[in-house]
Image (cartoon, helix red, strand yellow):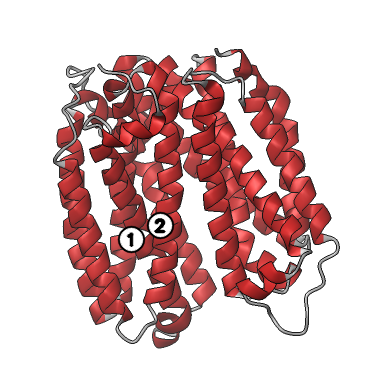
Amino acid sequence: MEKTKNQFTLLFTERFLPLFLTQFCGAFNDNLFKNALVILITFHLAVVYDLNAQVLITVVAGLFVLPFFLFSATAGQLADKYEKSFLIRIIKFVEIVLMVLTAFSFLTMSLWLLIILLFFMGAQSAFFGPLKYSILPQHLAESELVAGNGLVSAATYVAILGGTMCGGLLILHERGRLYVSAGIVGVAVLGYIASRFIPKAPSPSPDIAINWNIFSSTREIVRFALPNKTVFQAMLGKSWFWMLGSVFLSQFPTFAKDILGGNEEVSTLFLVLFSVGIGIGSIFCNRLLRGRVSGKLVPYGLVGMSAATALLYFFCLSAEPGPELRGALAFAAAPSSWGVIVSLVALAACGGIFSVPLYAIMQTYSPRDHRARTIACSNILDSFAMVLGAVFTALLLLMHFSVVNIFLVMGVLNLAMTPFLSKLARVD
């Protein structure tokens, strides 16, 4: 296997580029579909069907996460048992079918069919997750794993940003449903085409028997991961990051409006800043580690996130929302806003530096014949952490915590995690 000297040269290799494009298209489509549906429910379908928009959106968010609890264990077993590129092509073909049905549902405004299809799209993503991360160590040298994971992480957040923005901006346009329908089908086709070029990745455990019982199989993969302290700590660290990130991302609209006096443009600006920051940190991580699979940056990333959160809180103390909500340009033009902007980018960049080594540690230190199931276990923990984050945020809001105080609480809890997760710094 030929090694690359620069992480960006991976983008010109057959063993990485097709997978990179496939996962980018998948992440983009997930968020294009999901956000278009949320916006359509908020501004139109909830009224047409005489339903509570906030309750329905909460249900929609839960239905997308639910398949990760239900199917990740099965997905991990299949990814360990069968050749991975073949499974990826099947999953991407299924995505095309789902998106054709979704396009029909958007055009006919079939709310319940859209919700059902969102659940199946979540299931498709749940089956793709273990394949995406377990195939990387088979195609990349160990010295390339941090670089590869950094590029995948950066691209994922760019895809989330792009899909979310396109879904929100297009769906309410006069011909928005047609544009979104064409987009989701077109991106699904592009993802399938890219998947056709992914090199084969032979099965590490062709003889395992698939346990189709989702409850006992989930219990089995969690039980298997527990004794491997290094891998399990990396899992918990990654899940903590997803919980922290989900709290910030979900509260950006309220943060922009109530704390800073900004409209939806400012909320979108924060999403852009967060995504760019994650990308910067993810890519810079490989340069800092010089290609080594190491956890030495983990404590620095944690402390950096807490410090950036404290700075964000400090700069928000002087914020005074005006009588009218400001747009993104007016917000950025105010000198006092740049402290908030820099703090958010720094927070996300430290998050990228913190999280990318965790993926590489999981891939390197998990047993080769059990790697996909280990990643499936991690996906289950991530989903649980995001649900826990939503519940915790709801409780703080019920206790009348302001959004900026919720951010500060998360920063303090993040600092409290440092002694536990800093043990990963010994992995080198």
The residue carrying pointer 2 sits among few (fewer than 14), some (14 to 19) or many (20 or more) residues within 10 Å by Cα, namely many
Q: Is residue 201 left or right of residue 24?
A: left
Residue type indicated by callout 2: Leu
Q: Residue furthest right?
A: 318
> Which residue does the image show at 60% across and 67% down from the upper left?
267
Rendered-image quadrant of the C terminus: top right
Tell me the SS state at disc 1.
Answer: helix
Front in this rendered view, residue 34 or 319: 319
Q: CA distance from mark 1 to mark 2?
A: 7 Å
| Image position of 248 with respect to 378: above or below | below
- Which numbered tag is attached to residue 63? 2
| Image position of 245 with respect to 380: above or below | below
Front in this rendered view, residue 76 or 209: 76
Measured from the top left, where is residue 215 in percent x and y? 37, 35
Measured from the top left, where is residue 91 in percent x and y? 20, 45
Q: Is residue 362 left or right of residue 78?
A: right
Rendered-image quadrant of the N terminus: top left
| Residues marked 1 and 2 touching at CB (< 8 Å) | yes
Residue wearing tag 1: 118
Q: Quadrant of residue 406?
A: bottom right
> Which residue does the image show at 81% across and 67% down from the upper left?
319
Q: Is residue 95 visible?
A: no
Measured from the top left, where is residue 34 in percent x and y? 39, 63
